[in-house]
Image (cartoon, helix red, strand yellow):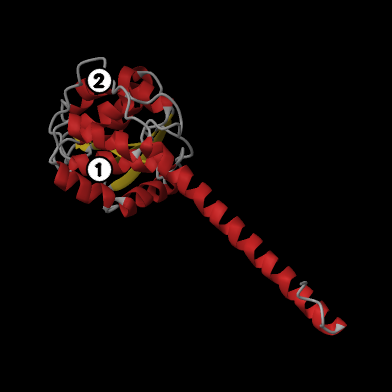
């Protein structure tokens, strides 16, 4: 027997309204559940995929004098160069493969330049942050530069799963890191603030894209800066550095 039988018109309208409201609530709940499932899929699916093949750096790692954490060279060198980079940036990989070793040999090894690698926040996307976090955490175990080279060797695109948490963990295992310490650092977001500060400092220095290089030196007590933008050939770095050294009388 229909529920409306024996009910007044007002009661019937109320009952119909109640049913309509109930249907609306269920629709809203259904949409929320579907949205939550889709969101979970977006974040979880990449880490459910197989790790896949891990490439090793194709060339011998450059000699990085006095390497410590994300820096190389004498901290008291007359010139400091900060590279603002992104492990997903193909031009950053080009600098690492084609120019960095020459810069290290000519100026870092000779005590003229103190070279520091810094991220540029989340410039290309979320995998940029994850990769930077992994590198900084590897630095805690004196393997920053090894992770740096491994990350660039495995860069194939932007936010396509090259640097999922699962793959970054596999990189750490390949480098024989203490995985307990690495996981505590990486999963705990230990360097989130540092990565944010990298981005802030880069913007404050005029960095607009990666890679960019901030050159800092002092002339008669006055701090001066210069900026190199892009993965330029070694000769461009040489011109800037030699000009700074000449200005300092060195």
Which residue extends farthest top?
A: 59
Kindly identify the residue that appears in the image at 45 percent across and 34 percent down: 159
Q: Give the class, few, some or many, for how many residues have Cα within 10 Å of label 1's Cα (few <14, many ≥20).
A: many
Q: Residue at x 54, y 56 (%)?
A: 33
Task: Classify residue 233 by image quadrant.
Answer: top left
- Could you tell me residue 229's position as x and y percent? 44, 31
| In-front residue for pair 198/110 | 198
- Residue at 48 percent across and 39 percent down: it is 208
Secondary structure type for disc 2: loop
Please name whichever residue, 111 or 136, is drawn nearer the observer in this view of the structure.
136
Label 1 with label 2: CB-CB less than 8 Å: no
Image position, residue 115 (x, y; %): 25, 34
Using the image, determine if residue 108 lies above or below residue 120: above
Residue 78 in the image: x percent, y percent? 22, 37
The mark tally for this picture is 2
In the rendered image, which residue does mark 2 sit on? 56
Residue wearing tag 1: 136
Seen as rendered, the residue at the extreme right is 9
Mark 2: give few (<14), some (14-19) or many (20+) Cα within 10 Å.
Answer: some
**Which residue occupies the foreground of this view, 3 or 128?**
3
Q: Is residue 6 visible?
A: yes
Q: Is residue 9 left or right of residue 217?
A: right
């Amino acid at each position: 027997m229909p529920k409306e039988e024996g009910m007044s018109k007002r009661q019937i309208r109320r009952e119909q309204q109640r049913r309509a409201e109930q249907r609306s609530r269920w629709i809203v709940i259904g949409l929320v559940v579907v949205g939550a499932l889709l969101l979970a899929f977006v974040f979880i699916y990449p880490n459910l995929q197989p790790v896949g093949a891990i490439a090793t750096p194709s060339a011998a790692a450059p000699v990085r004098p006095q390497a410590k954490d994300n820096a190389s060279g004498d901290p008291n060198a007359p010139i400091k160069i900060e590279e603002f980079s992104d492990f997903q940036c193909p031009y950053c990989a080009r600098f690492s493969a084609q120019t960095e070793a020459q810069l290290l040999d000519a100026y870092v090894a000779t005590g003229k330049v103190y070279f520091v690698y810094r991220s540029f926040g989340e410039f290309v996307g979320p995998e940029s942050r994850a990769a930077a976090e992994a590198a900084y955490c590897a630095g805690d175990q004196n393997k920053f530069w090894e992770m740096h080279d491994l990350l660039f060797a495995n860069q194939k695109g932007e936010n396509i799963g090259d640097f999922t948490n699962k793959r970054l963990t596999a990189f750490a295992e390949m480098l024989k890191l203490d995985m307990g310490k690495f996981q505590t650092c990486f999963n705990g977001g230990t360097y989130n603030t540092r990565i944010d500060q990298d981005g802030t400092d880069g913007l404050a220095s005029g960095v607009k894209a990666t890679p960019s290089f901030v050159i800092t030196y002092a002339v008669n007590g006055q701090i001066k800066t210069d900026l190199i933008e892009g993965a330029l050939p070694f000769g461009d770095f040489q011109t800037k550095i030699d000009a700074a050294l000449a200005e300092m009388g060195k």
